[in-house]
Amino acid sequence: MTNLKGKFWKVGRWYGAIFIVLLAFRLLYGYVGTSTGRGDDYSDDFFSSIENLRRNYASEKFAPEKIALKKDVAASASIASNQKFEKTASVKSKTSEFGQDEKLVKAKTLAYKAIIQYEQNLGQKGNRQIHLLIGVPPAMFDKFYQEIQQIGSVKATEITKVDKTNEYRQLNAKKVSIEKTLQSLNELKSKGGQIADFVSLNDKILEIEEKLQELGVELGNFDAENEFCTVKFSLYEGATEKSISFIHRLKVTLEWTIKYFAILVFASLGLSVTIFVLLLIADKLKLLTAITNNLPQE
């Protein structure tokens, strides 16, 4: 009896250790699994599928002695003394007070002297979305970006800054080149010639003027009065996510652990019985073999 009792406690300690390991594993998984797997996927960018959105650029003064100027660009020192850049922030939030937070976003936009350059409303009540492209004065960008994150429950944020100085200089150099070409064509127009050549020259001048106008529109985005940084704000309607209490987690953990521990116990008992029966059969076969070998042979 003492030997049997010792074996029983030894097996019991092993099963107890397995139960505790399963319990701890499921409780830890409850925290890690729900924190990484909960909620919707906010990785998609709504604005990436929309073309011809307003592009905002800002400028920043820096020391002109640090700039290596080419001869054809040196004529415009004011252009070279600014760094042109595109700064864009993306904020995605979820809220249960959609109407109230929508009004709050627009109130903050007005307070910061920003401009809503694009607005898109989607969905029905209970599952609404609003996507805003907001142009913010560069001096107020950082503060506005922090303020806008106080609206709803923030799910994703991103901020990027791209240098556009070289692109700006290239556009200006291209403008100078086109203006020179246009001037040369106008000088040719003042000279006499055949009507066919005159018509062809006139068409060429119109084409050059059209290119110059398009270039002027692009350069207009870089003008001081048009300087803005961009905030892409997406607000999604949905119920506020409630935190799961420890008691509820423990209840679910115990249910799961008891279920799979019972399966493990019955599986191990079934395996033990199977092995025991196989050993008995093997012993019986050995006994029959021994009896057969001991029989007198005729």
Image (cartoon, grey):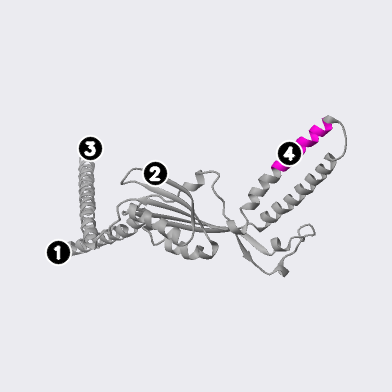
Residue at 78% over, 57% down? 72
Which mark is on residue 5?
A: 1
Q: Position of residue 142 (x, y in %)?
A: 50, 64
Residue 23 visible from this viewpoint? yes
- Tell whether position 90 is magenta: no
Q: Which residue is mark 3?
A: 297
Q: Which amino acid, by three-letter code, is at mark 4?
A: Leu
Return the disc, 1 or 4, that comes first in the chain's sequence: 1
Residue 45 visible from this viewpoint? no
Q: Which residue is mark 4?
A: 206
Q: Nearer the viewer, residue 40 or 114?
A: 114
Looking at the rendered structure, the secondary structure element under dot 3 is loop
Q: Position of residue 113 (x, y in %)?
A: 49, 60
Classify residue 168 as left or right of residue 87: right
Which region of the structure is painted magenta? 196-210
- The crowd level at tag 2 (other Cα within 10 Å; few <14, some 14-19, many 20+) is few
Classify residue 283 as left or right of residue 177: left
